[in-house]
Amino acid sequence: MDWLYIVKLIVYVVLVGVVAAPNIGLFFTWMHRKLGARMQWRIGPPLYQPWADVVKLLSKETIIPATAHKTTFLVAPPLAVASAVLAIVIMTPFAPPVQVYHISFTGDVIVVLYLLTMPAIAAMIGGSASGNPYASVGVQREMTLIFAYELPFIMAALVPILKVGSLRLADIIGYQLEHGPILFSVSGFLACVVLIMVMQAKLTLPPFDIPDAKTEIVAGPYTEYSGASLALFKLAHAVMLFAVPLFISDLCLGGLIVRSLSDPVTLTLDIVLIVVKLVVLVLIAAFIRFFNPRIRIDQAFGMFWKTATVIAVVALALSFVPLPYF
Amino acid sequence: MTGLVTWARLKSPWLFHFNSASCNNCDIELVDAITPRFDVERFGILVEGSPRHADILVVTGFVNRQAAPRLRRIYEQMSNPKIVIALGSCATSGGIFANSYNAAGPVDRVIPVDVYIPGCPPRPQAIIDGVVKALMKLQSLGGGKK
């Protein structure tokens, strides 16, 4: 643990967490909105739209309702952003063998699983602290949704973990570098399907935008939020739009790896692959989002516990079959 | 810094729609104005569900005595800087309900109004034009608070 390592670590955390994560997340938000617009034969928002939204909200007055618990109400939005950003920082976009600023540690998959749940929990904390009846309905729905999707999510995440036999993301990525992506096996494919289903619920996009259904319960947990607090929640949503596809690509698609910095051909190929992996996952989320209506909370619950969990169990069982391509 | 803030405010006006005893004609036209045909998301305009999130309050209809305190409350719930648009003849002047027994007056007797869009109902083009005028008002406010 020398000084140079610490400086490198700080530079890495600032570059990935403060510069890259919010901007890439906001760019993906723009992609979603633009794609939705093009599907409706519209022109859609310009590229700067998500940035303008966030800057505008940051500049506005933040109102704390008289019924709210002030500290909890104000702590929830930074909590959401911080955990989403921290998840991205841990998920090491650059993995071995390059080991650029390599901060993976044993058990970081578990940490990331917790951190990816934190934005939803922060919304619940903030919503229930705001003292608004619509927010409380939204919190109930959010809680039910978390109960519904966490079980299949963790079971699907177990498939790559058991295949590799390690709780370290760097090991999982290294294994896939050697043996090919986990997606190209039966169990890995099923796990990936479940993870994509859960991704939609984690991002609270249609058909699982039940907690913040605009036409039913105003804005769900975010009803009382205004100004900078709301901007932070929007930012947390944007960062999650980067974090969850990143997690799935780390577990199933071989991770975002640059294998060599010296060889220009491999470097270009790897950068193209990184972009393709992320963009394909974000586009899948966008297509599911714009092709589906919102479903009821009990339907969502049934979908996760009756369909996704069964698929995850099958995937988990198949991952023990000692044959190639299982 | 104020330049950036002003730019962001001009590029991202979020609407909140309040129906205060309207006959629904203006509401239908407002919904018309946010359909893909007119594509107001090009200008960053979104319709929000909560007044806390919105920058522009669009009031349709003549305000009666029951709606007046609620309109005032909605206005107070919005965060600064905020703009109010009175949409339609009834909201701007009272229209055919001007001498009604339950009159609380047109919108500007209840809350301060920045932009008036006349018409019964106004066309979607007129509504978009009104929002642009509201943005000009927002620009003249600069980065400061109203």
Image (cartoon, coloured by chain):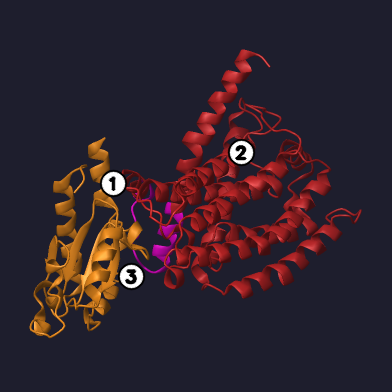
In the image, A170 versus A203, the foreground residue is: A203
- Separation (CA) of disc 3 from disc 2: 38 Å
> Which numbered disc, 3 or 2, marks the residue closer to the eye?
3
Q: Chain of mark 3?
A: B
Q: Are marks 1 and 2 in contact (CB under 8 Å)?
A: no
Q: Can the viewer see residue A280?
A: no
- Separation (CA) of disc 1 from disc 2: 36 Å
Name the residue: 67% across, 27% down. Answer: A99
Name the residue: 59% across, 24% down. Answer: A9
In the image, is residue B102 part of the stretch drawn in magenta?
no
Where, by quadrant of the figure, is residue A314 drawn? Answer: bottom right
Q: Chain of mark 2?
A: A
Label 1, on which residue? B8
Label 3, on which residue? B36
Where, by quadrant of the figure, is residue A146 drawn? Answer: bottom right
Figure label count = 3
Q: Quarter of the image for the C terminus of chain A: give it.
A: bottom right
Q: Residues within 10 Å of mark 2 (few under 14, many from 20)?
A: some
Residue A288 vertical placement versus A271 (above, below): below
Q: Can the viewer see residue A236?
A: yes
Label 2, on which residue? A270
In the image, A250 versus A82, the foreground residue is: A82
For chain A, give the colour.
Answer: red
Residue A302 vertical placement versus B145 (above, below): below
Point out the tag, 3 or 1, that comes first from the N-terminus: 1
Q: Residues within 10 Å of mark 3 (few under 14, many from 20)?
A: some
> Which numbered disc, 1 or 2, marks the residue closer to the eye?
1
Q: Position of residue B99 (x, y in %)?
A: 7, 84
Q: Which segment did they paint magenta?
A: A30-51
Q: Which amino acid, by three-letter code, is at mark 2?
A: Asp
